[in-house]
Amino acid sequence: MIIVYLPSLKTAFRENKKEYTMANHKSALKRIRNSNTKRLRNRYQAKTTRNAMKSFLALTDKKEAQKQLPTLVSMLDRLAKRNIIHKNKASNLKSELAVHVNHIK
């Protein structure tokens, strides 16, 4: 049995546990390392976007919301482009954000 250590990323999702794999080839071990790195990066980006949306939906100032809307839309489009979230989900979230901005008085 081969012990593979997960790569440590400088993110909030640092995982320092050992993972036991059944991989027998160098390419399979490399694929496991790359998959773990990508998974951590995707989790970090998705969580960052969710936190930004939460703080955006708590805004009560219309000018500030209009200022932050393009940044959030860009974040959602980036997640959809990288297949972290589905493009229709990104579209629905962008619509929800636009409705929120329009309802702020």
Image: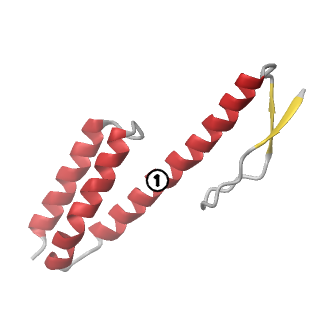
Work out whether residue 47 or residue 2 is closer to the camera in this orientation and state it: 2
Identify which residue, 64 or 93, lies in the foreground.
64
Please, what is the three-letter code of the amino acid marked with disc 1?
A: Gln
22 to 36, vertically: above or below: above
Residue positioned most to the top: 24
Q: Which residue is mark 1?
A: 45
Q: Position of residue 102 (x, y in %)?
A: 9, 65
Q: Horizontal placement of 32 versus 21: left or right?
A: left
Q: Residue lying furthest right in this view?
A: 1
Looking at the picture, does residue 23 appear above or below residue 46?
above
Provide the secondary structure element on which disc 1 rests.
helix
Q: Quadrant of the C terminus?
A: bottom left
Q: Residue at x 17, y 63 (%)?
A: 100
Tell me residue 75's x, y (percent): 33, 54
Pick whichever, 74 or 104, lies toward us: 74
Q: How far across and how far down the image is residue 20, in percent?
A: 82, 33
State whether residue 21 is above or below residue 6.
above
* Residue appearing at x 54%, y 49% in the figure: 41
Measuring 79% from the left and 48% from the top, which residue is drawn there?
A: 17
Q: Is residue 27 above or below residue 96?
A: above
Give the quadrant of residue 69. Answer: bottom left
Give the residue displayed 56% in from the left and 41% down from the top: 38
Q: Quadrant of the N terminus?
A: top right
Report x, y in % for residue 58.
29, 72
